């Protein structure tokens, strides 16, 4: 299993490469008024209007800095059974990958009620890496804002 | 006294001399008389004292002796009684008791018989009566512990067959007192032969004897003591010595050979008068000793020397006092006589002194008093001396008056001549002085001109030297200026090169940025490639490895560009600061160049001015030399004039000296005469 590694603040997090469509450089986002602050807005990806989240803000930290390694990770967000929509996730220092088997990932041990998207924890020589669950990223009302045509999730 | 007025310290006055002579003579005579008197009186008094001492000693001895003879009589009487009457036991005891009671001198008495002598079977028979207060006590002597047969008072009369006085002893048998015993042997007829039967004794207490001897008063502090046949002290004011020490012990203790000799003489029964040092009185004393014929003891009487000779000393003091009084009277009389003898001489001397000091008038005035005084003189020699002195004074007074008048006339004439000559001399001297003054001044001008010429030459030389130095400085400055120009050019070249480097550094920076961007793109590409390869599953494995390698390269590139960037930034900074320093330096060099140029100009001006000076100096120099020569000529002429004036002055001085000589002679005469003040 290939993981894409990135940073929120000083902590390392990982996304399963199977959820990832592509990684692209940072672009300008069209803001969505009255959306939660971690919603950066929308941008055009290969002709498709795609919403984007700021993972730093989602995790309760300041906005991601505008660095060369701050990139948009496009993930397949499941909206219905067997159907996914692209969702942009902005994170810092998206430059590395790692191979990890399922057995190497342990349960997080603690569960934050407001952050159901935090998954299992693995470790390497530089410390702990927490997985991010793509399916749990959006609450229902936000999903309704971002993907209004898809209706309520199953 | 006035006579000693003009004499030196060594010369004494006549009165003092005569007085001293008399005093010394009288002192010598008086001293001789006093010494003879003292020694004679001392001898006489000593003889008298010795006689007195002998009498005192013998009187004391006879007092003691009479008492002792009284004591002796009693036992002698009792011995006869026993030998003739053979008294019964009761009679014997009564006799002993009465002997003690009747004789106050006797302390105790004993009848001691030979063993078994009085009664058969009774070894000891010796009743002893002794005094206790007003009564007597009886003790029976003789026991196994007390063998009286061996004691001195018993044994010695038996052996010698005559009565004896024993040495003083402590009576251990009865009374424990210090006693001496007179012991008389008595005898009986046994088979027609006179046989020793026993002794009868009389004891005297020594306290009694000591009291007797001590009661002898000798002068004030003198004393007397008794010594026994062996030289032991029987009585002595030093109670410690009594019965403990002998006169020989004392002699031994004080290492006094003389005392030992005396002691031997005393024991032999000698008599004498000796001087010795008494330890008891702690002063020199005389002792008179004589034997006590009854007991064989000796009485010694001690006289302190000072008390013995007290009369002599008193007499001497009186004689000395009278001598001193007489002496004082004698001195007084001698002084009075001397004054009277010397007075007329003093008068004449005073008058002669007054004349010698020149006060003839004063002397003439005193003459009348003198005549009156000398008229009273009784001595023929003095009155003749006075008369001749008066006539001599009068003649002298007249003579001096005449001499004086002549002297005054001579002095006046000579003074006038001297005054004229001095006037002339002063005038000549003034002329010479003025000439010399002028000569000196013109010589001064000449020498000052010479000095000025020399100074001008020196100044000229210095100016030339200055011009030369300035010229040299100027060429050095020109060289410096050229060097500065070159320096400015070189620094400008460096500055422009630094600017070029700075520009290059900026362009390197932009290139590095581009490389960085490319590396970032490559990284992104490799990430996406990795994702794609993962999606391709098994087929994408090789591609995935490639993607990873690419990403690694991109990372390294990014790292390298980061280093380059840092280096380029540093270089850029260094170059910028270098450019700034260079600009500052160039500015300073330019400033220096300007300064050098300015100094160069100033030096040029100095040189020009100095060159202008030289010809002026030469002109002044020539003038000065001409002036100096002129002054020298004037000086020479003046010197000649001065020489002539000096010669005139010398001649005048010679004349003046002769006149002064004359004047001095006249004044000397006047002075000599003036000493005698006729007017007074």
Image (tube, coloured by chain):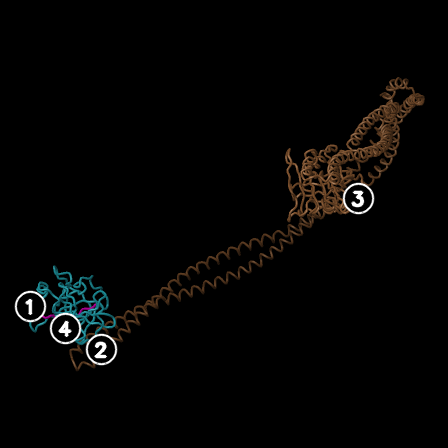
Q: Are marks 1 and 4 on the same chain?
A: yes
Q: Which numbered marker is on residue A19?
A: 4
Residue span colored magenta: A70-78
**From the viewer's perspective, is residue B114 above or below residue B650?**
below
x, y percentage for residue A132?
Answer: 16, 69
Q: How packed is label 1: few (under 14 Cα within 10 Å), some, or many (20 or more)?
A: few
Q: Chain of mark 2?
A: B
Label 2 SS:
helix
| 3 or 1: mark nearer the eye | 3
Label 3 SS:
loop
Magenta portion: prevailing SS class: strand
Q: Chain of mark 1?
A: A
Q: Are marks 3 and 2 on the same chain?
A: yes
| 1 or 2: mark nearer the eye | 1
Question: Viewed as shown, does residue B155 lie left or right of A10?
Answer: right
Q: Are marks 4 and 3 on the same chain?
A: no
The front one of A21 and B426 is: A21
Mark-to-mark CA distance, 3 and 1 = 180 Å
Label 4 SS:
loop
Q: How packed is label 2: few (under 14 Cα within 10 Å), some, or many (20 or more)?
A: many
Q: Chain of mark 4?
A: A
Q: Colour of chain B?
A: brown
Mark-to-mark CA distance, 4 and 3 = 172 Å
Locate the N terminus of chain B and report the quarter of the image it occupies.
top right
Locate the C terminus of chain B and report the quarter of the image it occupies.
top right
**From the viewer's perspective, is residue B369 above or below residue B466?**
above
Give the residue number, with chain letter if any, for mark 1.
Answer: A153
x, y percentage for residue B637?
Answer: 79, 42
């Amino acid at each position: 299993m290939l993981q894409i590694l990135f940073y929120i603040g000083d902590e390392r997090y990982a996304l399963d490469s199977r959820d990832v469509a592509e990684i692209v450089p940072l672009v300008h986002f069209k803001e969505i008024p009255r959306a939660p602050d971690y919603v950066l807005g929308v941008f055009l990806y290969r002709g498709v209007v795609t919403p984007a989240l700021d993972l730093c803000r989602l995790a309760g930290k300041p906005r991601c800095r505008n660095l060369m390694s701050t990139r948009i990770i496009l993930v397949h967000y499941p909206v219905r059974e067997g159907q996914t929509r692209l969702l942009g996730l902005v994170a810092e220092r998206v430059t590395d990958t790692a191979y990890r088997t399922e057995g190497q990932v342990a349960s997080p041990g603690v569960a934050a009620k407001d952050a159901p998207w935090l998954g299992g924890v693995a470790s390497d020589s530089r410390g702990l890496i927490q997985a991010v669950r793509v399916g749990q990223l959006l609450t229902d009302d936000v999903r309704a804002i971002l993907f209004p045509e898809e209706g309520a999730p199953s | 006294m006035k006579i000693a007025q003009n004499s030196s310290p060594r010369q004494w006055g006549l009165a003092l001399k005569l007085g001293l002579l008399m005093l010394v003579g009288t002192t010598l005579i008086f001293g001789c008389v006093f010494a003879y008197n003292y020694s004679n009186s001392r001898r006489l008094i000593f003889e008298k004292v010795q006689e007195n001492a002998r009498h005192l000693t013998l009187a004391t001895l006879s007092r003691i002796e009479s008492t002792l003879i009284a004591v002796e009589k009693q036992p002698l009487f009792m011995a006869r009684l026993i030998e003739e009457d053979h008294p019964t036991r009761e009679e014997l005891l009564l006799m002993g008791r009465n002997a003690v009671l009747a004789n106050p001198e006797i302390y105790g008495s004993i009848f001691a018989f030979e063993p078994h002598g009085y009664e058969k079977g009774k070894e000891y028979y010796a009743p002893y009566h002794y005094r206790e207060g007003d009564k007597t006590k009886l003790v029976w002597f003789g026991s196994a512990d007390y063998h009286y047969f061996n004691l001195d008072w018993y044994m010695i009369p038996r052996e010698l067959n005559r009565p004896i006085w024993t040495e003083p002893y402590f009576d251990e048998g009865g009374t424990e007192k210090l006693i001496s015993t007179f012991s008389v042997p008595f005898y009986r007829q046994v088979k027609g032969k006179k046989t020793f039967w026993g002794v009868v004794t009389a004891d005297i207490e020594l306290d009694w004897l000591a009291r007797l001897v001590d009661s002898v008063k000798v002068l004030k502090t003198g004393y007397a003591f008794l010594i026994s046949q062996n030289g032991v002290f029987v009585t002595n004011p030093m109670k410690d010595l009594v019965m403990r020490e002998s006169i020989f012990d004392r002699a031994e203790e004080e290492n006094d050979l003389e005392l030992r000799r005396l002691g031997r003489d005393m024991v032999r029964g000698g008599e004498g008068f000796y001087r010795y040092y008494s330890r008891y009185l702690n002063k020199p004393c005389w002792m008179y000793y004589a034997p006590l014929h009854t007991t064989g003891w000796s009485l010694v009487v001690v006289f302190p020397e000072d008390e013995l000779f007290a009369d002599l000393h008193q007499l001497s003091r009186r004689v000395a006092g009278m001598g001193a009084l007489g002496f004082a009277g004698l001195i007084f009389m001698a002084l009075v006589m001397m004054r009277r003898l010397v007075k007329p001489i003093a008068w004449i001397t005073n008058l002669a002194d007054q004349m010698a000091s020149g006060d003839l008038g004063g002397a003439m005035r005193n003459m009348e008093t003198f005549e009156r005084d000398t008229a009273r003189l009784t001595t023929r020699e003095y009155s003749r001396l006075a008369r001749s002195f008066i006539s001599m004074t009068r003649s002298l007074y007249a003579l001096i008056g005449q001499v004086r008048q002549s002297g005054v006339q001579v002095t006046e004439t000579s003074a006038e001549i001297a005054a004229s000559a001095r006037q002339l001399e002063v005038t000549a001297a003034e002329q010479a002085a003025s000439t010399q003054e002028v000569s000196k001044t013109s010589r001064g001008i000449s020498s000052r001109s010479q000095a000025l010429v020399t100074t001008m030459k020196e100044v000229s030389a210095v100016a030339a030297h200055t011009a030369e130095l300035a010229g040299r400085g100027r060429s050095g400055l020109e060289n410096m200026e050229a060097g500065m120009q070159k320096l400015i050019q070189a620094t400008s070249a460096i500055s422009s090169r630094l600017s070029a480097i700075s520009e290059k550094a900026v362009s390197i920076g932009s290139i590095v940025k581009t490389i960085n961007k490319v590396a970032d793109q490559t990284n992104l590409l490799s990430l996406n490639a990795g994702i794609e390869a993962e999606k391709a599953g098994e087929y994408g494995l090789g591609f995935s490895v490639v993607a990873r390698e690419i990403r690694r390269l991109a990372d390294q590139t990014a790292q390298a560009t980061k280093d380059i960037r840092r280096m380029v930034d540093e270089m850029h900074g260094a170059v910028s600061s270098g450019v700034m320093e260079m600009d500052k330096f160039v500015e300073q060099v330019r400033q220096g160049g300007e300064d050098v140029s300015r100094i160069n100009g100033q030096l040029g001006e100095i040189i020009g001015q100095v060159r202008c000076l030289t010809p002026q100096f030469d002109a002044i120099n020539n003038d000065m030399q001409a002036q100096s020569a002129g002054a020298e000529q004037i000086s020479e002429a003046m010197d000649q004039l001065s020489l002539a004036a000096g010669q005139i002055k010398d001649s005048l001085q010679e004349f003046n000296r002769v006149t002064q000589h004359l004047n001095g002679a006249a004044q000397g005469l006047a002075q000599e005469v003036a000493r005698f003040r006729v007017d007074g």
